[in-house]
Amino acid sequence: MEDILILCWTEKSMLRCFTLFKKVQNMSQSIEVLNLRTQRDFQYIMRMESQIKGLRSKFRQIESDRKTLVNKNFQELKGKMESLQPLIPVLEQYKTDTKLIAQFKEEIRNLSGVLMSIQEEMGAFDYEELQQRVLSLENRLRNCMNKLTCGKLMKITGPTTVKTSGTRFGAWMTDPQASLKNNRVWYMDSYTNNKIVKEFKSIADFVAGVESRTYNLPFKWAGTNHVVYNGSLYYNKMQSNIVVRYSFETGRVVTQRALESAGFHNVYPYTWGGFSDIDLMADELGLWAVYATNQNAGNIVISQLNPDTLQVLNTWNTEYSKRNAGESFMICGTLYITNSHLTGAKVYYAYSTKTSSYEYTDIPFHNQYFHMSMLDYNARDRSLYGWNNGHQVLFNVTLFHIIKTDDDS
């Protein structure tokens, strides 16, 4: 028994206890993020449940007297009911997930209390048992977060105006691969003839205009469709179909590669123009390039890229004209396309790279300042970053979670 007792008043043991304490603190932060996301989506799904119940009641009433209705109307209602049916198991899963997160929060509180007592009382504790509890909780939390990572876009709310600055066109972003403590913001004003990137340590510094660093890129960029991913900036080199990967850590270009056959320099831009031919983006599954080619008749092409080498890993051809798209963004391997960059725009089309299939959608969002020249999804924040006529804005997204099973690859 004495072999497994660790005396926390020794320097080595205190260090180990402190390490566990920090790990529990980090998990606590992750749980809070997960809890906020799940609660927000859960409220939306609960509203959907009431709609399902109302439709079910109405449907039964209609079915009992269907002769009094035009068959077309009956079939439309029946189709709507069938489309909502999949939400029922999802709702039940949300209820389970909410309970699971509450259980995690309680276990975190208990572990934090134990570790605080150790630090305060300098007593003895079975360290190995405590470490196993922390590791078990960490693994369960990771599994839960992985299960809830991906989903289908259901709703866009907002925007929240973060700042008003710069020209009508530009881009701003954070790194979806960064830790929760790393909230650096990058700011790239204008869509052409510029190569200055401004960095801010946090959203608060960004709002206050307190720059932490400025980068002078070796090549000017084209468009506003850049992305920061795992410490590197990916952008389209001006007047070319070359994608550049620039490392913020080294201040150098790591690699650059041409996207074969991709149109550039306003050959296949979005509806607003601005040399927006090549759109680089990231989601839960990695790095992507969205563009158009002559071979695909000017329709959108999606390519998944290797973040290190920029090599094309896979490519999908869609049937949606790039010139008719307002903006686009990836969530969980699905490309969502808006039908305009102006007021009244909505997410109109979705292409799944998992199934190589598309569907038409009708998801409105509020284009508050009338001209959207950048719209990108950040998987860490589960938000859309937008540049709306000189205003930097954030939208929240609600996802219909795809619950993984053992049969899923």
Image (spheres, rainbow, N blue to C red):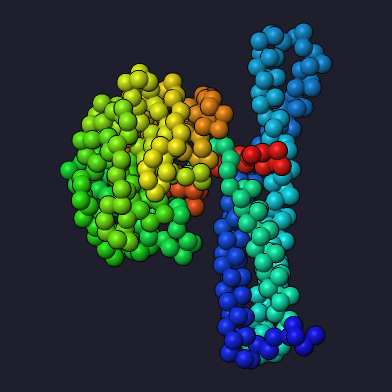
Seen from the viewer's position, the closer of residues 312 and 288 is 312
Answer left or right for 401 relative to 395. right
Residue 343 at least partly seen: no
**At 62% across and 91% down in the image, what residue appears?**
10
| Above or below: residue 366 compared with residue 210 | above
Residue 165 in the image: above or below residue 49:
below
| Quadrant of image for the N terminus | bottom right
In the displayed structure image, the side of residue 379 where residue 134 appears, left or right: right
Total labels: the figure holds 0
Residue 161, placed above or below residue 211: above
Where does the image place residue 229, in percent across and percent down from the top left? Answer: 40, 51
Is 9 in front, or is 387?
A: 9
Q: What residue occupies the far right of the structure in this picture?
A: 64
Q: Is residue 164 left or right of residue 383?
A: left
Give x and y (percent) for residue 78.
70, 19
Q: Is residue 12 above or below residue 375?
A: below
Q: Is residue 58 visible?
A: yes
**Quadrant of the image occupied by residue 241:** top left
